[in-house]
Amino acid sequence: TWKTFESVTVADCRIFDVRRDRAKRSGDGQLGDFYVIDSPHWVNIIAFTSKDEVVMIEQFRHGTNKVILELPGGLIDDGEEPIEAAQRELLEETGYTGLAWKLIGTSHPNPAIQSNTIFHFVALGCEKTGVTAFDQNESIVTKLFPLREVRSKIISGEVTHSLVVAAFAYLWAEPSVQ
């Protein structure tokens, strides 16, 4: 294990900070610098309509320089509970609201360099009840797919977002919510 003895923020990047931790390994005393991305926790939502379609979104992602098919989701605001963030993000990004909500799992997006957690939710009985309210730099298109088609898109590599794949892994491990 490593014991951090110095931690310094080296970059403030609006939605996350980068810090450098100086740490010492127990056992042999090896010293090292480690860079960590501190970000608020996140949510994503597998939202099912009353017709059992999955509400998904397409949006351009700068990291891959591509339009990515993924689940609605986003950052948890200060003072907000994960379920509140999930309900807000689903409405803001798609205009949909859900009747029944369940947390199906949590995961660490990339524990090698990130300190946050993502909360994966399922929302059932979703209907379009509102209008979207995108963030300043969001351009999102809502798409509806039968669950079997989403599975095919994951297997074929059309869905590549690892946090989307993780959410569906939790869903398929818990058949009571399908």
Image (cartoon, rainbow, N blue to C red):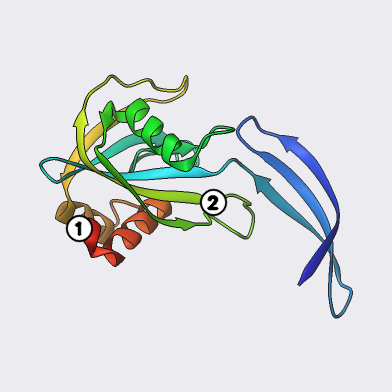
Q: Are marks 1 and 2 in contact (CB under 8 Å)?
A: no
Q: CA distance from mark 1 to mark 2?
A: 27 Å
Q: Note whether 84 is above or below 105 in the view shown.
A: above
Question: Residue at coordinates 86% horizontally, 72% vertically from top-left?
Answer: 30
Q: Earlier in the sequence, mark 1 or mark 2?
A: 2
Q: Is residue 71 left or right of residue 83?
A: left
Q: Is residue 36 left or right of residue 120?
A: right
Image coordinates for residue 1, horizontal then vertical, percent: 76, 72
For residue 59, which quarter of the picture?
Answer: top left
Query: What amino acid does circle 1 point to?
Result: Ser
Image coordinates for residue 9, horizontal then vertical, percent: 79, 41
Q: Residue furthest left?
A: 51
Looking at the image, how many numbered discs can be counted on the residues? Answer: 2
Q: Is residue 109 visible?
A: yes
Q: Residue furthest bottom?
A: 27
Image coordinates for residue 72, horizontal then vertical, percent: 35, 38
* Residue corresponding to mark 2: 117
Question: Residue at coordinates 36% horizontally, 48% vertically from top-left?
Answer: 121
For mark 2, give the secondary structure.
loop
Dot 1 crowding, Cα within 10 Å, few <14, some 14–19, many 20+: few
For mark 1, give the secondary structure.
helix
* Residue corresponding to mark 1: 152
Question: Residue at coordinates 34% horizontally, 33% vertically from top-left?
Answer: 90
Q: Note whether 116 is above or below 27 in the view shown.
A: above
For residue 8, which quarter of the picture?
Answer: top right
For residue 71, which quarter of the picture?
Answer: top left
Label 1 or label 2, whichever lies nearer to me, is 2
